[in-house]
Image (cartoon, rainbow, N blue to C red):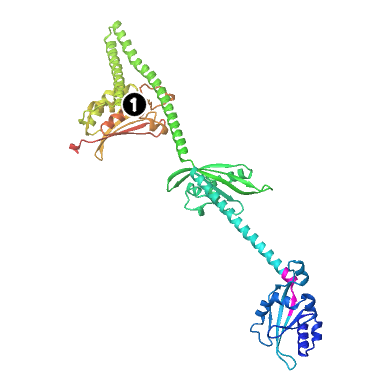
Amino acid sequence: MTDSTSRSAEASAVGTADRAIFDRLIEPYLMLDPGLRVVFANRAWLAMFGETEAALGQCEHLIRALVANLHPGQRRLSPAFSLDTPDRAATHEQPSRYWQIHVSHLPATADEPPLILLRFDDVTMHTLATRTERREKARLRSHARLRQILAREAEQRLHDHRVRFERALAFAGVGAWELDVGTGAVHCSEQCVEDLGLPDIAGLDRQKLFIEQPDPVAEHWQALQAKRSFECERCIDGARGRRWVLIRGTGQFADDGTMQSVMGFTLDITSRKERELELSATAGEERSGRERSEALAKTMDHFIAAVSHELRSPLNAIVSWAELLQVVADPSHVARAGEAIRRNGRQLSHMVDDLLDSGAVVTGKLSVHLQPVDIGALALNVVEDIRKTAEHKGLRLQTPHVEPCIVMADESRLEQVVWNLLTNAVKFTDAGSVSISVSTSDGQAVLTVQDTGRGIAPDALPDVFDRFQQIAPQSSGRVGGLGLGLWLVKNILSLHGGTVDVASAGRGQGATFTVRLPLDSNLR
């Protein structure tokens, strides 16, 4: 019977006082007076609970609470409660039925006084289902809380492991990084950011990790795609100065062979790299030193051979002419022999002087005694000394412009400079002319020696003033000399505060040597 049907029956039974109808209702009903004494119990109640007083004793406190302050016409519903039935109470089984009481306060009528009507509804199934649902929800909530606790504990352990791992890497000076291939996002440790010289991780991308040279990214990426690791070294200029960092990485692949991420590390190798560079530089210096030593040895061999030849030539001439004088009485031959002996003797003397002066320059013992010297007059004297040699070769020795120029110089050393320049010009000129001029410019005396000789190749100009260096190649025909003249010129002028320069348009175009010396300050 539905609730609305029951209520209609209640009203009919009470209102007409027809206890017989009330007694036929299938729900357990009780009728109490205002003092809560049982007025009537229907058969359904008696069949379910038996003795009325005993059953009411189990729920008296609940009934009293329900009817308290209940006014006529009002209804109330109790919460679900357990109530033993006689059969279960006798067997001491746990109560398995639950009930709800519907309380109605019926007003008094002409036939009946005010009554309290109680209807007992069996809600066992609903209550058990609700309790089962609650227990299941509680169990699920408990499991959820347990999973949350376990997840937090696992996350905390993972965090602790990560912190310890990063601390260990930092202690070892190693930075860790990981690149997500799909998103391009890079995750790395603080040590990695520091190694790469970045202010924060926001500036880190694939290019900064992989780049080593102008564009090696494709090469590194191809290596990773081929399931090989890559390695590169980067030079980084940052707040800590220039440092070298080693970067290594390897790909992580899915089951289908797709690369999902790249993991790797960074390592500061500045000390090792500096040591490598230092060793490389030392090896380079040693190699250069060996090359210079070998070149010097070859130069010395060449120099010794040249000295032997150059000294032998005038000595042979002197000996030959001296032997000729013993057997020839013709005065013309005597004069010719004397001139040849004088010329070769002077050449020999100049060679010996050059050798001695070169030793003095190397040891720093070459000295000069400065005094006022007219470089113009000195140049004309040297020209006259060399004129016969020039005319013997068919050369024109010219002095187009020579003016008096007083400089502070060692006269013998300055004469040596002019002599070496003029003899070189005559030596390397096969035809044409050699000219010398002296003038002043910007407080300096300028001496120029110009010839129309073999010239100098542009790539050989920087080596002209080197020691033991011949300014003309062997292919041009051998020219006598020790290769010391121009080297001595440069060093002697340096002691005087002067300079010497050379210019040539190339092979066969002649050469021009320009000497500059400061004028005597008292005569400016």
Which of the two residues, 503 or 204, is positioned nearer the viewer here?
204
Read off the magenta span.
Answer: 119-128
- Residue placed furthest toward the bottom: 110
Q: Give percent across and percent down for residue 256.
A: 69, 48
Which residue corresponds to the image point at 63% horizontal and 43% vertical from the top-left? Answer: 227
User: Pointer 1: what residue?
Assistant: 424
* Numbered circles on residues, count: 1
Of residues 414 and 430, the one nearer the viewer is 414
Question: Left or right of 268: which side holds 310?
Answer: left
Q: Position of residue 17 (x, y in %)?
A: 78, 89
> In the depicted view, which residue is nearer to us: 484 or 454?
484
Q: Is residue 501 above or below residue 225?
A: above
Residue at (48, 46) in percent of width and height: 195
> Percent from the top left, x then y, of residue 223?
61, 43
Vertical order, 257 against 399 (above or below): below
Badge 1: residue crowd in 10 Å (few <14, some 14–19, many ≥20): some
Q: Position of residue 375 (x, y in %)?
A: 23, 31
Residue that protrudes farthest toward the top in the picture: 327
- Residue 66 sits in quarter: bottom right
Residue 123 included in the magenta stretch of the image: yes
**Given the current orientation, which residue lies at the most extreme left position?**
522
Q: Is residue 399 visible from the viewing direction of this image?
A: no
Q: Give the residue type at disc 1.
A: Asn
Q: Helix, strand or loop at disc 1?
A: helix
- Looking at the image, residue 412 lies above or below residue 242: above
Please indicate whether residue 252 sits to the left or right of residue 453 in the image.
right
Quadrant of the image for the N terminus? bottom right
* Viewport quadrant of the C terminus: top left
Residue 69 covered by magenta stretch = no
Q: Quadrant of residue 55?
A: bottom right
